[in-house]
């Protein structure tokens, strides 16, 4: 397992990368109605130096305009930050039309699991190669997707519990009953492994909404298995006994879109195992849908030895030739899988979370506004600690908000913050 520090995370940024992250946060905070003033950053010396930057306080509109003008005047330095100088205060509102800034802000804190706020944002920034406009656009599109289209956090909180109790989504439950996707074991990098057993998929078994909810739940449950510094999962598409009757373009496109657009930098590797000859023509179509970054993470494996190049035998399922004796069986949700009904304790933890979010915003604002390297680093350290506290708060609050999922009922998942 690799122990070296991953690049492009909050504790391993270059000065140029840190500048871009500051600018992304400035865009978000400004959209949320916070006031941020910016010094000019001298990246060539990797130090911070302040120039005149007094914003007019005559009106919120004038102040916001001047704040963004300071971004436009920042000099270009490297390819990393070559497209980060132009900020558009209308960018996020133009994407999240119909949504209120306060709802989008609340959505951001709801998106967090055990990851820190900075590392969540950095997933999008890395996916867009530290290009400011493209990164902010990607984040805003995900806000819109989660709040107005997929309702991903509601799906995550309800899990399969509500659908099972209300019997209103039989296709969702059937996918869990079949064990179409199983999270079990880790690869050689310590990443959780999701095994997709394609032979179990029949297009008529579920409708589009049920497929979407199932996909979201698989990804969100996989996120719960992550523990920083491990922040990606790996996927095996097991094509054993695959036939054309199992082929279904819609969920393939859905999964690709989810990883590329809304869960960026979440995929470690994707193994396509034992692809039959009939899959070659299908693959010629699928690969045209792929982002080059995702495509670079795909490997074809044919034999057990091929798999062991990426995953130790003890973590490979017995049905695939390995020593992992886990046999999936769907455990139906019961009344004991409801979240804990304790409004008082939940309110205490929710207040704590709101206070931590406020402290994080304050530290982030001071980090952005810092006029020397020492102050900037001090506020960055504060942010890292607050991020860790928010992860611990998520773990504490989770049992008061979320119905227990199948992996908790199987005894495989115990959400922890490290």
Image: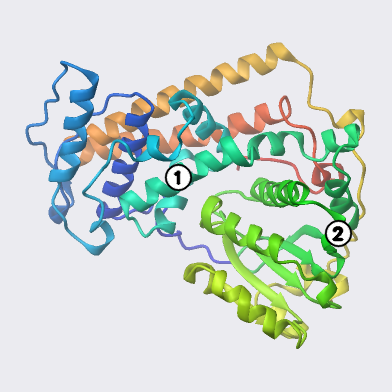
Quadrant of res 33: top left
Pinpoint residue 232: horizontal percent, then vertical percent: 58, 57
- Quadrant placement of the N terminus: bottom right
Residue 248 makes an appearance in the image = yes
Q: Earlier in the sequence, mark 1 or mark 2?
A: 1
Residue at left 75%, top 66%? 248
Q: Which mark is residue 210?
A: none
| SS for dot 1 | helix
Instruction: Specify whether 370 is left or right of 338.
Output: left
Mark 1, residue position: 139
Of residues 98 and 12, the one drawn nearer to the viewer in this rendering: 98
**Residue at label 2?**
204
Q: Position of residue 257 (x, y in %)?
A: 58, 58
Residue closest to the eye, 26 or 139: 139
Can residue 10 be seen by looking at this rendering?
A: no
Left or right of 305? Residue 26 is: left
Q: How far separated are the C-alphas under marks 1 and 2?
A: 33 Å
| Residue positioned most to the left | 52
Q: Which quarter of the rendered picture does the C terminus lie within?
A: top right
Identify which residue is drawn at 62% across, 15% down: 348
Left or right of 9: which side holds 44? left
Q: Position of residue 24 (x, y in %)?
A: 34, 42
């Amino acid at each position: 397992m690799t122990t070296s520090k991953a690049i492009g995370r909050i504790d391993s940024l270059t000065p140029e990368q840190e500048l871009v992250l500051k600018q992304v946060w400035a865009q978000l905070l400004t959209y949320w109605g916070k006031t941020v003033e910016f010094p000019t950053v001298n990246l060539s010396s990797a130090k911070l130096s302040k120039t005149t930057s007094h914003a007019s306080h005559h009106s919120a509109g004038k102040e916001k305009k001047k704040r963004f003008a300071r971004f436009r005047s920042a000099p270009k330095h490297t390819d990393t930050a070559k497209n980060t100088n132009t900020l558009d205060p209308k960018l996020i509102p133009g994407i999240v039309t119909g949504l209120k800034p306060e709802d989008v802000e609340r959505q951001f804190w709801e998106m967090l699991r055990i990851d820190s706020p900075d590392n969540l944002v950095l997933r999008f920034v890395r996916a867009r190669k530290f290009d400011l406009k493209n990164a902010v656009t990607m984040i805003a599109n995900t806000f819109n997707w989660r709040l107005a289209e997929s309702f991903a956090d509601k799906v995550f909180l309800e899990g399969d519990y509500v659908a099972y109790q209300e019997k209103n989504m039989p296709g969702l439950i059937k996918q869990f009953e079949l064990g179409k996707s199983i999270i079990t074991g880790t690869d050689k990098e310590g990443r959780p492994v999701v095994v997709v057993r394609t032979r179990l998929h029949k297009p008529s078994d579920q409708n589009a909404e049920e497929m979407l909810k199932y996909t979201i739940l698989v990804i969100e449950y996989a996120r719960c298995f992550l523990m920083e510094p491990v922040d990606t999962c790996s996927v095996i598409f097991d094509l054993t006994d695959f036939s054309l009757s199992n082929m279904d373009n819609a969920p393939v496109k859905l999964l690709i879109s989810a990883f590329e657009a809304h869960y960026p930098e979440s995929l470690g590797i994707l193994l396509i195992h034992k692809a039959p000859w009939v899959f070659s023509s299908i693959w010629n179509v699928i690969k045209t849908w792929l982002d080059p970054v995702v495509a670079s993470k795909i490997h074809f494996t044919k034999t057990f030895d091929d798999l062991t190049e990426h995953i130790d035998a003890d973590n490979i399922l017995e049905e695939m030739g390995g020593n992992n004796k886990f046999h999936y069986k769907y455990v139906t949700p019961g009344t004991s899988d409801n979240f804990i009904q304790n409004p008082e304790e939940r309110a205490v933890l929710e207040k704590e979370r709101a206070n931590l979010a406020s402290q994080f915003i304050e530290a982030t604002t001071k980090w952005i506004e810092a006029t020397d390297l020492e102050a900037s680093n001090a506020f960055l350290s504060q942010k890292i600690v607050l991020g860790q506290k928010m992860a611990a708060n998520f773990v504490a609050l989770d049992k008061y908000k979320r119905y227990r999922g199948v992996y908790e009922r199987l005894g495989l998942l115990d959400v922890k913050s490290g």
